Amino acid sequence: MKPTAPVLEVVDRPGCQPLRAGWLLLVLVATPLAGAQSDEPVHFASEIRPILSDQCFECHGPDRAARQAGLRFDLPEGLFAPAESDHVPITPGQPELSELLQRVISDDPDLRMPPPETGAPLKPDQVDRLRRWIQQGANWQQHWSWQPPVRPQLPDVADADWPLGAMDCFVLARLDREQHDPAPVAVQETLLRRVTFDLTGLPPALDELDTFLEDRSPNAYEKQLDRLLASPRLGEHMAWTWLDAARYADTNGYQGDLTRTMWPWRQWVIEAFNANLPFDRFTTEQLAGDLLENPTIDQQIASGFHRNVPLNGEGGRIPEESRVEYVVDRVETTATVWMGLTSSCARCHDHKYDSLSQEEYYRLFAYFNQIDETGSVDSGRMAHPILKVPVRDKVHELRLVERRLADRKATFAAASTDRQPPDRQAWEDQLLDDGQTPPVWSPWQYLGPIQADSVGHGHNKRYGPEETGDASRVYGDTVWQTQDWPDDSIITMPLPPSCVGYAYRQVHVTNPATVELTLGADNGIRLWLNGAPLLNQLTQAGADTEQEKVTLELEPGTHHLLMKITNRTGSGGFYFQSTHGGLPPDIAPILKTAGDQRTPVEQQRLTELYRKSLPEFRDQAQQIRRLEGRRLRLENEAYVKTMVMRRRAEPRETYLLVRGRYDQPDKSEKLLPQVPSALSALPQGAPADRRGLARWLVTADHPLTARVAVNRYWQSLFGIGLVATSEDFGSQGAPPSHPDLLDWLATEYIHLEWDRKALLRKIVTSQTYRQSSRATAEAFRRDPQNRLLGRGPRFRLSAQMLRDQALAFSGLLAERIGGPSVKPYQPVGIWSEFSFGKIRYTPDGGQDLYRRTLYTFWRRSTGPTNVFDNSDRQVCSVRPRRTNTPLQALVLLNDPTYVEAARLLARRILNMADQTSERHLATAFRIATSRWPSQDEQNVLEGCLERARKHFQDQPVAAELLLDVGQARRNPHVDNVELAAYTSVMNVLLNMDETITRE
């Protein structure tokens, strides 16, 4: 049930009132600048509590075990009541009688606090603030983030015409206090580029830019927002940060780092964002989707949020120790993602800074302690509970194939059955003779080796040849090679440990025939005939004779046999022997029976056999066989297994773990699920399980959830949250730069019934968001981090946005949404280095090379974009890191992704008809930056092009080498020198500061 939202005032226009002249004079006189006046009010929450938290809470805070002298300064009774020594730490209005202040300023090292050996004395301005706070009455306030957000009144501002909405009033009021003017509105090109990146993660296309610039209507910007908010690219972009928070990866982590299948959960996240699933449901389905009444498959998939935890499949592990670690991870991830709390230290002792005791930690632990898991990993890859999930596009394709197959079979069955041989006896005699003709086998073709994570993984994974068995196709850098392997002997293949190899050959028969195969393999073997699976065996034995026997019933024509061998250790190999069994076993007896003595069934069997030998019927039969093979293949592909949550049938008891150790439970008290007492109470009737926890998190009076959520949206749009420490809203975290704005956003989000897109729309239509990011040197000096929000945000694009925009500029970006992870270009040897050569990276081909970075295969031990500060997905991460290093520039200039994108962008530009080189360069500049170049910039580009032309005219081999980068085909109709020259210039454009920066 959705929590009841409080009655809140909805303000579309701010209604801010201009300050009267007298009030303005008072504001100007009282405005705090660099030095504060002694009579200014000191605020406990923002000025005193941080001092106590940094300097005092470690010894005099919430942690009972570490508390000294019985003093607790995080509660008012600890600050204002007499201590065991009868001294009063704080006496309001009387600094000289306040023992805490006297200890801070004492010259006696035995009395001074903090103790001199800590090396962390209070600074003079901190001492001054503490003294003034006591003089002013020592007003105490609970930590701001532990109080439920209350809808604030809109402040008065000096310029009532500037705000476009309530948010702007709070921003402008702060700017007024700081005597700081807001920046002007950004130009249209910059604004569209900014909001397109922020909502979709991609740059605007030229036609989108032109449409916006040509639209003179007053709501032109709002029209673009409607388009962007409805774009499926929004879900992909927003999913990235949620995947970071959920520690999503395609492997388990730890030493083996084996592959898992969690992409169905990722697809659910994308679809949830695109469908604008309200945040309360988004929360409930991920934390407790499996516990809902009659949960759908999608809701069960959603519960996989907490199955993204790394799994330990190492030998010698203790399953219960691993299981406890998984539960701990879920507690700490939930606390960080939904509440912005650091909880890890409460695993071993009471939190030193926030009101979270060790007992309360393990009561939260109890919510996640009932999962039906053991700490073991099944077959080295995934751990139960596991759900079989339909893959929608594959299921749809399977249904189409089944319909086509049924139609073909019906057509074949309805075909004329009165076709008889002109001379039946001669045909039957010939059939007997031909039945002795052995099949004709083509030479073997070999494809491999292909690196696998493990034998089981390699044996089951489809690497490509299974799709067609076509020996003319190329799979990455691996190609088919003809082999002269003899039959009836054990073949040693060039197949290292943990690798897969494919062997392919054709067999041709002139009449229906039976062929017996005798096979053996080291260690796994799979066999397909015309795409239909015939054998699937994984053993511990090496290749030997007589291991497996398979019978092939062949119709007249050419058939395709594909064999897949998976090797565990040593050198892989196989054994192959074929025996011609002659005619199908039921045919020879019929032929030896006199015609007038045959039954109608036997006569019909011969008629069918004759019909199948005719070319037109043979083609139909071949089509049916192909469809049968495709159907069988799709039946395998139409379903995948993914990890989900599921409650144990037998409840598991929860105890406090002494020092956090799995094997030291304190069994003196059984702990039931419960939420921290310092936060809001559980809703009435909430069940004592994950459903109740989820309901509690999204209640209207929860002090943290809405604040944390809106702060992260703000962070994604402005580069930094209103609370800079988006992972920590506790005592050690940063205070909000605009407390009232944060609370207004939080209460507004609840009032909007957790409508994410509606909230985003409010933020990006604000005047605050629309400001130019350009500012004076003085403005940058006064506010280098833009904490006052006096200008538009400007920051470097993230790793995934850099790659995605390069693909978009070049026209390479694949449009497909969802599905399994893919493997684009990656430097050679990275996987081999961490795995001691056991795992090799093989890039995908075709469109999979050019899908959005969101879908890139993520290995925990070496993520795909580590150079650009991305999360390693080992633990929950909610605050992005941004750096600018020479190594990043090196990647952007030389990585195949960007070099190929530059070449395709050059080809795109050169394909534009009736344009001069000057226009080509200007258009390319506009594609990269969303604006036309200045004359100086145009001159630089033309100079770059001329120098590049001369360089490649003098060194044509260098042009060839440059144009050979990447798998995308070259245009044979474009001169190599010209294309290489333009490619070099496009490479420059892709690396300009303006191109890789969102401003």
Image (spheres, rainbow, N blue to C red):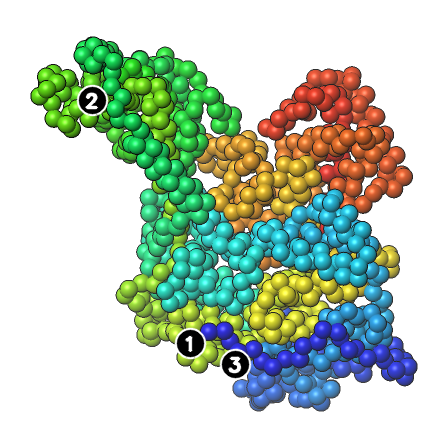
Q: Residue at x 87, y 57 (%)?
A: 776
Q: Earlier in the sequence, mark 1 or mark 3?
A: 3
- Image x and y of residue 231, in percent: 62, 53
* Tag shown at residue 20: none
Estimate the spatial distance between the alpha carbons at disc 3 and disc 2, rounded to whole Å: 100 Å
* Tag shown at residue 606: 2
Residue type indicated by callout 1:
Ala
Disc 1 vs disc 2: which is toward the camera?
A: 2
> Mark 1, residues whose alpha carbon is within 10 Å: few (<14), some, or many (≥20)?
some
- Image x and y of residue 417, in percent: 26, 26
* Element under disc 1: loop
- Answer left or right for 608 relative to 963: left
Q: Residue furthest left?
A: 597
* Tag shown at residue 686: 1
Q: Earlier in the sequence, mark 3 or mark 2?
A: 3
User: Is residue 319 visible in the rendered structure shown here?
Assistant: yes
> In the rendered view, would you say 450 is above or below 117?
above
> In the rendered view, would you say 533 is above or below 798?
above
Query: Residue 789: which quarter of the image?
Result: bottom right
> Mark 2, residues whose alpha carbon is within 10 Å: few (<14), some, or many (≥20)?
some
